[in-house]
Amino acid sequence: MSRQLLSRALVSINWLSQALETSKPGPSLRVLDASFYYPPIRDGRKEYDEKHIPGALYFDIDECKDHASPYEVMLPSESFFANYVGNLGINNETHVVIYDADQVGVYYSARAWWMFRAFGHCKVSVLDGGFRNWVKQGLPVTSEVVKPKPETFRAVLNPALVKSFEDIQRNLKAKEFQLVDSRPAGRYNGVEPEPGEVILPGHIPGSSNIPFTSFLTEEGFEKSPDEMKQLFKDKGIDLTKPLTITCRRGVTACQLVLASFILGKEDTSVYDGSWFEWFHRSKPDDRVSA
């Protein structure tokens, strides 16, 4: 696999560096830093303000969400998303490249990538290796924040890429789709605590577990397609059949969506409310824990 334009969903650090040398960030190419604000673990906006890829703008996942929902980072409305990304200088022809600064390489950027796809935008890619490897390669960083000219963006939600609580509940018996949980095994199995707010660990009955970090190398790059394919195969996941991914709040689930997309499966969906919503709304008998 080339380390340049790796796929429609994945671009290399070299590719982005060269692209920024030949054309300034603007409506044709927009780079977004999606590092998350999740105290006390990290303050993504503060990290962005201190240093980021030149020309990159900050995409705040905690701001671009449904603020009326009690369930963490649920998708916003079409109009909210359209207005939010339009103010970042993005239109429907913009190639959006997203990264984050987490040490695993690809963490929150996959969520932002999936959000664009969920709202109908296909010209969106994740930076393989993330900001960690951009810095490691000695490429330029800055604290300068550019102010983009607002653009018009039309968002149309693709409901096939999003699953609701009711969808998951029905699937317990209907078995219409495979369900995979991307959290660490300890939390999935109910033997390690959930971070943040007090909810108990465990998982949805019938779900399999493939931790999202399984798809990343120690250096923070995506593993090869053959390795990704084997990870799904080892858990009995058939990529020719319907697949939904869950996690705690619909963030790391998107890493598995990205992996399946790279493998040619473009219809993998996310249970947006994930374990946080399921824990609060499901019956105790519909939760599996140690």
Image (cartoon, rainbow, N blue to C red):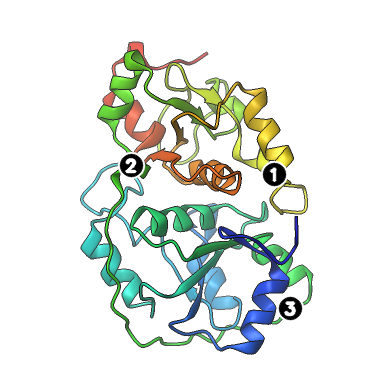
The kind of residue on which mark 3 rests is Leu
- Closer to viewer: mark 3 or mark 2: 2
Q: Position of residue 5 (x, y in %)?
A: 66, 65
Displayed quadrant of residue 79:
bottom left
As drawn, the label of residue 126 is: none
The kind of residue on which mark 1 rests is Pro
Q: Are marks 3 and 1 in contact (CB under 8 Å)?
A: no
- Does 119 sit left or right of 223 as displayed? left
The kind of residue on which mark 2 rests is Ala
Q: Quadrant of the N terminus?
A: bottom right
Q: Which residue is mark 2?
A: 160
- Does 3 sit left or right of 108 as displayed? right
Look at 55% across and 34% down and name the residue there. Answer: 183
Displayed quadrant of residue 248:
top left
Query: What's the distance in space between the residues labelled 3 and 1, CA to CA?
Result: 27 Å
Query: What's the distance in space between the residues labelled 2 and 1, CA to CA?
Result: 24 Å
**Residue 134 versus residue 177 in the image, above or below:** below
Look at 69% across and 44% down and name the residue there. Answer: 225
Pick whichever of labels 2 and 1 is earlier in the sequence: 2
As drawn, the label of residue 225 is: 1
Q: Position of residue 58 (x, y in %)?
A: 46, 72
Look at 37% across and 44% down and name the residue there. Answer: 161
Q: Nearer the viewer, residue 63 or 250?
A: 250
Total tally of numbered discs in the picture: 3
Q: Position of residue 267 (x, y in %)?
A: 43, 42
Pick whichever of labels 3 and 2 is earlier in the sequence: 3
As drawn, the label of residue 139 is: 3
